[in-house]
């Protein structure tokens, strides 16, 4: 009787973190929304799949190749920020602090799942650095076991190229309090203390 | 550069309770999902808009008219459960406890927003009851000020029809504890106590 609704709820449950109840709420929103809103949702889903590709230089998402960041001559091409996902690029761009270029790995090394250097955009990073022009590689990987071992691996791979390899600081988030900081972060914050 | 992505994020932010971050996560899921998954999402959105209508008897959502509940001869047509939304019907049906028929009001009376009896399916309810065959009208409206005043209004409208008008019980949710119950609910639970 409500077959189409059940099918939609099932499809919406595939979105990350969405269960039966949230999917049902979304489905009822769609059911009650104006057909203009629904049409624009459908069109935007189609467009995102059809128009976005990976930049052939940095592997960020883009609809032109090379992407607008890579082809922007006002950005500092001597600094390369290495991230795991395109979402990380968006996050850093939103902060407006970094003016260099990016390299998106599309993952990290996970030996237990047999994800090796050739499964992510790591050979392309090494090649890009060896081509010259880069002075510093800033690793902005997630502070996970895999992120850190990938950072170590990249550092080793880039040895001998004369390029400085750094990683972003781990510590207490600004605006947070010691009380709510987990022991691991606190340990890192103490370890990486800065002389005043 | 990421125009299509921004457009999609904007469209997804119209879903109830979805902000920038959640919309971005959904957009990236859609971006990375297989085209089969995305196609089935689009198809199910279209189907829900195209195929679902309101039942001409009870105003629940349906793809056949009258709906499968109204046309099911094994259900008890002497008992009518009045709810605010089609979602409420789904919730009660899921419990499997009620075997009567429904009447969906599609809202409640909100005098402050000028939502009167003719703006919801209230005249249709009165007409349906006056046609005869109904012995009890069970009001399953939300325990809000508007829900309760609508319940009172319906009771008055059905006076003289000889039909019993009842409302579902308010009280402490089963499995919950007194400690976490708000004072209003607790007050209602005490007021509506049952002799053992």
Image (tube, coloured by chain):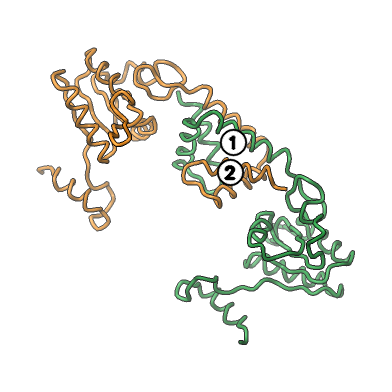
Chain colours: A orange, B green
Q: Nearer the viewer, residue A175 or B74?
A: B74
Compared with residue B91, is residue B166 higher up or lower down, i.e. above or below? below
Name the quarter where the N terminus of chain B is drawn: top left
Which residue is at the far right?
A: B131
Which residue is at the far left?
A: A195
Left or right of B156: which side holds B31? left
Name the quarter where the C terminus of chain B is drawn: bottom right
Q: Is mark 2 on a helix, strand or loop?
A: helix
The numbered dot on residue A48 is: none
What chain letter is assigned to the residue under label 2?
A: A
**Which residue corresponds to the image point at 13% horizontal and 19% vertical from the top-left?**
A160
Give the residue at mark 1: B41
Indicate which label's residue lies in the foreground, 2 or 1: 2
Compared with residue B71, is residue A166 higher up or lower down, i.e. above or below? above
Left or right of B141: which side holds A155? left
Which of the 4 quarters of the picture holds residue A195?
top left
Q: Report how far apart the C-alphas of labels 2 and 1 lie in the structure.
A: 9 Å
Which of the 4 quarters of the picture holds residue A179?
bottom left
Left or right of A110: which side holds A90? right
- Residue B21: where, in percent of width, then height? 44, 41
- Residue A189: where, in percent of width, then height? 18, 46
Give the residue at mark 2: A10
- Residue B181: where, in percent of width, then height? 49, 72
Compared with residue A31, is residue B147 higher up or lower down, i.e. above or below? below
């Amino acid at each position: 009787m409500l077959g189409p609704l059940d099918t939609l709820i099932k499809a919406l449950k595939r979105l990350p973190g969405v269960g039966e109840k949230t999917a049902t709420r979304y489905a009822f929103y769609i059911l009650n929304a104006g057909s203009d809103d629904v049409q624009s949702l459908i069109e935007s889903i189609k467009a995102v799949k059809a128009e976005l590709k990976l930049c052939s230089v940095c592997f960020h998402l883009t609809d032109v190749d090379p992407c607008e960041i890579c082809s922007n001559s006002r950005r500092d091409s001597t600094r390369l920020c290495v991230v795991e996902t395109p979402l990380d690029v968006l996050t850093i761009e939103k902060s407006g602090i970094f003016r260099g270029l990016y390299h998106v790995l599309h993952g990290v090394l996970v030996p237990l799942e047999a994800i090796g250097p050739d499964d992510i955009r790591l050979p392309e990073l090494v090649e890009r650095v060896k081509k010259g022009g880069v002075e510093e590689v800033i690793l902005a990987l997630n502070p996970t076991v895999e992120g850190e071992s990938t950072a170590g691996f990249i550092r080793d791979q880039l040895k001998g190229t004369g390029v400085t390899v750094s990683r972003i600081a781990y510590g207490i988030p600004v605006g947070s309090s010691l009380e709510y900081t987990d022991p691991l972060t606190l340990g890192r914050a103490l370890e990486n203390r800065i002389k005043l």
